[in-house]
Image (cartoon, rainbow, N blue to C red):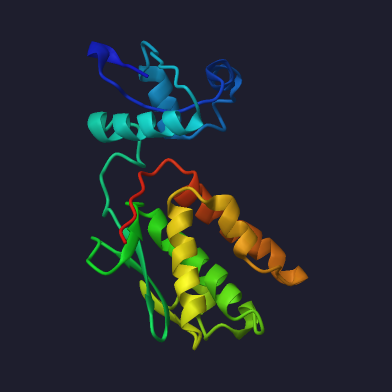
Amino acid sequence: MHGAANIVLYVGKAKSLRHRLGSYRVANPERLKRRTLRLLRLVERIAWEECSDESAAILREAELLLTLKPRFNRAGVWQGPKRFLAWRSQDTGLELAVVDSLEDGWNGAGPFGAHAMHIHRALVRLFWCRIHPDVGLAGMPAGWFHGEHGTRVLISHQSISLIADACERLCRLANGGGDEFSLWLLPAATYEQPIRDEDLELVEKHLAGGTTAKTAFA
């Protein structure tokens, strides 16, 4: 949305531009936020770009937000910490971390920005249940379910082969092997299934088929 002197006021993404603009025309001014009302009063011209798919549209929107920093956009206009996901197999277990840069000896994917912490927590829950299926989510160390393990956590286990397999599965996931990873996970208890489905969807969206650039290091 452009204002006077062709200044970009707002950048947004819509699957249906006609529907989005129509919603502004019929909206009740008494229910709209003051910020939105100010924006609509200042708009003089609307320009749009067509993208090949949703992923391309998200990338283009992010690029324009960082470049133009429109006055009426709040999210996405400043570059936050990159934040990578990193993992490695240890003799004592699988180590998962959120780091600002990848180091030798670690496998990694990203950058993911603010999403990294959410993906990390989901991976901890998924791998815990796969490595310790006998106890499940209820048997996680205190606070782990809600992410109180911090940015670096070691899921311990005595089977070196299982840990090495878990590390390899995550590498494959980061290189597009989403279906293979989901099949590798064990069936969840009925009460745990919704949580696992949500975690798996988040992880696959960002690691196996999301819009974020991915890198993996052996």
Asked where in the image residue 105 lies, by quadrant, the reply is bottom left
Residue 59: percent from the left, percent from the top? 38, 33
Task: Give the residue furthest to the front.
Answer: 161
**Identity of the residue drawn at 74% across and 72% down:** 189
Judge by depth and name the residue closer to the eye, 46 or 147.
Answer: 147
Q: Is residue 118 visible in this depiction of the protein?
A: no
Q: Residue at horizontal 52%, vertical 77%? A: 162
Where residue 157 appears, x then y in whole percent? 50, 85
Which of the pair 110/41 is nearer the observer? 110
In the rendered image, the vertical position of residue 205 relative to residue 122, given as above or below: above
Q: List x then y, in percent, for residue 119.
A: 46, 60
Which image quadrant: the C terminus? bottom left
Nearer to us in this view, 15 or 201: 201
The image quadrant where one finds the N terminus is top left
Residue found 52% across the figure and 18% down from its top: 17
Q: Residue at x 34, y 32 (%)?
A: 72
